[in-house]
Amino acid sequence: DVKVTQSSRYLVKRTGEKVFLECVQDMDHENMFWYRQDPGLGLRLIYFSYDVKMKEKGDIPEGYSVSREKKERFSLILESASTNQTSMYLCASSKVVIGELFFGEGSRLTVL
Amino acid sequence: KQEVTQIPAALSVPEGENLVLNCSFTDSAIYNLQWFRQDPGKGLTSLLLIQSSQREQTSGRLNASLDKSSGRSTLYIAASQPGDSATYLCAVYNTNAGKSTFGDGTTLTVKP
């Protein structure tokens, strides 16, 4: 089975802090994605990567950056956390861009 | 721009009932459609993936159908159980947009 692991299930941070959300997949997938999920707004794509060191902006990249130094790991970075970034963050991967998406358990971030 | 709608937003049924969840999309130029299950506070679990050339997919008590021309997919759950209680989301991958668009989900409650 595909395993997508998000290292932190729950985080509480202060406004202005730098936040790292880590995601690791164990199935040699080429593509990795970061979404956020908010009530009433659904899932929105923040960034995705189709190869090591490659990244593409999604629908809401403002205030975020990403890093993909190794194929299995995709990190989401909040350079200066703000309260409107309080959300559930979901990482996903797929073998091919048009392939089946597999999600991690999610990281619930609260910014105070 | 693709829009994905899932109606109803919530559904409550007695245990043992067969039920159908609906997913509608506005742009029929899709490559695939995927159904997910999400338990409260958790990530998304992939249930079924239907390629655009397929009409349906089955897994156990689940059957998903796809009618691209009418922009509709249905997820049929047979002999529902309390353990089926969750939010069910559909996502369509558009070839021209190069990404998946998610519906807001239908929250299913199966009463014992």
Image (spheres, helix red, strand yellow):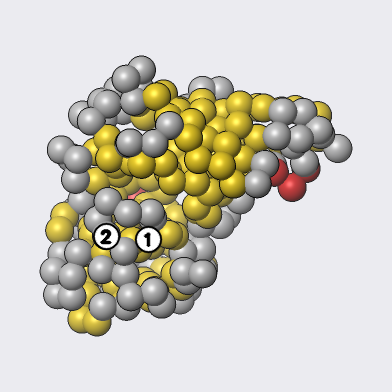
Q: Is residue B60 left or right of residue A98?
A: right
Which residue is situated farthest in the right direction here?
Answer: B112
The N terminus of chain B lies in which quarter of the figure? top left
Q: Which residue is mark 2?
A: A96
Please report, as a chain letter, where disc 1 is located. A
Q: Secondary structure at mark 2?
A: loop
Between circles 1 and 2, the one closer to the viewer is 2
Q: Quadrant of residue A83?
A: bottom left
Which residue is situated farthest in the top direction here?
Answer: B70
**Residue found 38% across the figure and 55% down from its top:** A101
Q: Is residue A36 left or right of residue A110?
A: left
**Residue found 21% across the figure and 64% down from its top:** A49
Q: Nearer the viewer, residue B51 or A2?
A: B51
Q: Position of residue B54 (x, y in %)?
A: 39, 36
Q: Nearer the viewer, residue A50 or A65?
A: A50
Residue A83 seen in the figure: no
B93 lies above or below B17: below
**Residue found 19% across the figure and 40% down from its top:** B95
Label 1 to label 2, Cα distance in Å?
A: 12 Å
Amino acid marked by disc 2: Val
Q: Secondary structure at mark 1?
A: strand
Q: Which residue is mark 1?
A: A92
